[in-house]
Every structure is written in C-alpha cells, then in structure tokens.
Image: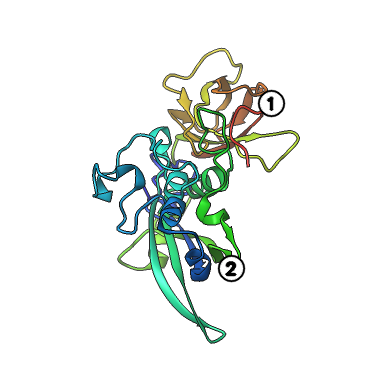
Amino acid sequence: MVYVHTEGGQPEEPRWADGGTYMVNMKIAQNRAAFSSLPDDGTRDTVIGRLKDGTRLDLKGANDDPHEEPSDVPELLPPNAHVRKAGPRGQHDDTEIFRRGLPYADVVNGRVEVGLHFCSFQATAAQFDTVFNDWMLNQLFPQRPDGSIPGIDALMSTATAHGPLVEVRHAGIFFVPPYDQDGLAAALTAAAGPSRRRTGRLAINKVVVSPGNPGKRFERGGFTFEVRDSAGKTTVPNSQFTTQTNGRGVCQADLTVGETYQLVEVSTPRPVEPTEPIIFSMDKPNKHLRVENRIVEPNPGYTV
C-alpha cells in the first residue's frame, strides 16, 4: 500500500518512480503544561481516544489489545477524538498510509522540549492530504446522524491557558526513490528512455469545490466514470471506475496511446453541478486528469 505501482494504482507516475514511496515527516512539539492543565485523566483520554495503556475508549472491557481493533466505524469514540478523526475506518479504509510517531527531546533556550517526529509512507501524497485535511482539520467530519458538528481534531484544536496541546514545528513531503542495489543513480536511470508502450492507463483526481468558499473540504469518494470513444457513443470495455475517499480513481481498461477519448461522469454520490465530458488524448501511457465538481448548496457534505 505504500509503494508506487505504475501498472496498478498509480499509472500516472513515471516509470522510474515504480517501487518508490512518498514520505511525510512532521516535527510536532508537545506542550506538557497545556496537557497537564486539562481537568483530569478522563479529559485527556477523550482528546486522544485512548487510555494511557493504549486501549481505545470504545474497547474498554471488551478487548484490551490495540492490534485487534474493529474495522467498523467506531461510533462509541468521541467524534473529535484524535484516533477517530485520523482513522475513521469503515468506508474510509481505502485511504491507506503506514505511520509511526518517534519521540524526541530537545533543549530549546535552556528548556527541555519533547514531542514526536511523525513519519508516514504512502503511495500518493493524496493519501496523507485526505487524512490531515479532509478528516483531522475538517470540523464536520465524520458526519453525525444527529447533525451535530464534531469539530476539528481535539489534539490539534484544544486550547488551554498554557497554549495549544501540540504545535507543528516543521513539516515536509518527500519522494523516496525505489531501491537499487547499485545505488540511487541506478534506480533513477533504470527506466530511462522513451516508452514503447502502445497502451496506457488513466488516473483521475476528483476535486469538489464550493463556489462561495474555496477552502471547504468535501467527501470525494463514490463518483463513477467511464471512458468512451472520441464521439462519446461507444463505451470502452472495462472502463467504468469509481473514486476512492481520497478522490483518486483509476481506469482498469488499457487505452491506446495516441487515441482520443471522452471521460464521462455517469453518477455522483451527492448533489453537484454536472461535469461536462472531458475530451482527452492518450498522449502518453501514464495519463492523469483533474476533474472538478461544484457542489450544489446548501452543502450536504463535509466542510472545514
């Protein structure tokens, strides 16, 4: 799930990137005084969504092994708890990253600062963008049955007399080239030269925007497309596909390089303005398109 696979889920990537991965690194300082100032352990547990021993709140008395967490949407967790916002599960499990937090301690201006080096690996940068922006910083995610607003991730938004609980000091997204036993240069030049492939694959990035507020974030999964011939009359076999929760969609049909096609949106999971068919040329075997929808207000989806 973390490696670029140009013949699979990431056909738009160049051939030399096959087997590489995208790495996100954040240095996150933890405000010990702010965390200690919270009323009690129960409040601190609610912010994270876990007890001190790592047990998730919705597993208390049922299963104390965090490796045996359920795959269903954890409704018993507070809606703005960190583990709920950063890992909602259920239909959102198609957004996959491998993440770890590594503790650090620094001396800054004569005082000890502690925190985490957050590091994650993912096959596309869109995976992390979805977790951080569509989920954690989206105040209406996850959608609540009673219409209430969950709020931004409590770990990122809780304010105290001593300041915020955490502060992101540094952050970056990097590409890690594929491994080659002969070194970096060999990894990057192994696939050099013009492609002789006669067919290619199409990947899209679905974007949903609000005309009145470009900063709003929306669910982008469940949009269905198909590829037709240049006249829009004949559907290419095996070309229908649906976007994942991170807005990405990959057409499984092999499309002829040099041919012209139409990308047609055939169904949407929520009210949006219709998208006109997109005429595109398979001018290369790793084609990528950005497809934008304008939401129909009032907004039935998730926003910031």
199 relative to 159 in the view: left or right? left
Q: Is residue 243 above or below residue 69?
A: above
Picture quarter with the C terminus? top right
Residue 156 in picture, x, y percent from top left: 54, 56
Q: Residue furthest top?
A: 233
**Badge 1 is on which residue?**
298
Residue 175 in picture, x, y percent from top left: 47, 59
User: Which residue is painted at 64% across and 24% down in the image?
Assistant: 272
What's the mark number on residue 69?
Answer: none
**Badge 2 is on which residue?**
162
In this rendered view, identify the residue nearer to me: 88 or 254.
Answer: 88
In this rendered view, identify the residue nearer to me: 24 or 114.
Answer: 114
User: Which residue is painted at 63% across and 26% down in the image?
Assistant: 279
Which of the 4 image quarters holds residue 291? top right
Residue 21 seen by the camera: no
Q: Amino acid at mark 2?
A: His
Residue 155 seen by the camera: yes
Which class describes the residues within 10 Å of circle 2: few (<14), some (14-19), or many (20+)? few
Q: Amino acid at mark 1?
A: Pro
